[in-house]
Each structure stands twice: as C-alpha cells, then as structure tokens.
Image: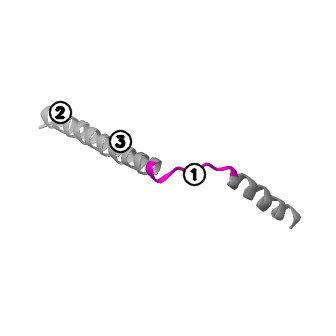
Amino acid sequence: MKKIIQFVKESWVEFKKVKWPSKQELWGLTVAVITASIILAVYVGLVDWIFRNLIYLVMP
C-alpha cells in the first residue's frame, strides 16, 4: 500500500509540471490533424482507384 501512495504522490507532482496547450494552440493542432487526415484519405483513395483500374486493364 505504501508503494501505491508513493506512486500517486509522484504522479501528481509530474502532472503539475505538464504544460497544457492554450485554446488557440489546441484549435490550430486540431485543424492540422483534420487537414492531414483528409489529405491522406484522398491520396490513399486515389492510389486505390489507380491500382484498381490497372488491375482491370490486365485482367479484364
């Protein structure tokens, strides 16, 4: 039990050291992740479409 209490105390000390992002930083990072996800989805979809059409050309 003593180790658990020590762990919780040390975790709380480390938790206080965390630098949380501001609302503006959080919004900017959220937009960046959504934009990157959309770009990646379009790229993968395009590559899939190209390979599907190539396979249909080879194997009619």
Residue at screen point 15% across, 37% down: 56
Residue at screen point 40% across, 46% down: 28
Is residue 46 on the magenta stretch?
A: no
- Estimate how packed mark 1 is, as few (under 14), some (14 to 19) or many (20 or more) residues with alpha carbons within 10 Å: few
Q: Considering only vertical position in the picture, is 47 above or below 4? A: above
What SS does tag 1 mark? loop
C-alpha gap between disc 3 and disc 2: 27 Å
Which residue carries the number 1 mark? 20
Sequence-earlier tag: 3 or 2: 3
Quadrant holding the N terminus? bottom right
Q: Amino acid at mark 3?
A: Ala
Which residue carries the number 2 mark? 54
Q: Which residues are magenta?
A: 17-24
Which residue carries the number 3 mark? 36
What SS does tag 3 mark? helix
Sequence-earlier tag: 1 or 3: 1
Q: Nearer the viewer, mark 3 or mark 2?
A: 3
Would residue 56 be found to the left or right of residue 43 on screen? Answer: left
Q: Amino acid at mark 2?
A: Leu
Q: Residue furthest bottom?
A: 1
Q: Nearer the viewer, mark 1 or mark 2?
A: 1
Q: Nearer the viewer, mark 1 or mark 3?
A: 1
Q: Position of residue 7 (x, y in %)?
A: 79, 58
C-alpha gap between disc 1 and disc 2: 49 Å
Q: Position of residue 48 (x, y in %)?
A: 24, 40
Residue 42: image quadrant is top left
Looking at this view, is 53 or 37 the one in front? 37
Q: Position of residue 40 (x, y in %)?
A: 32, 40
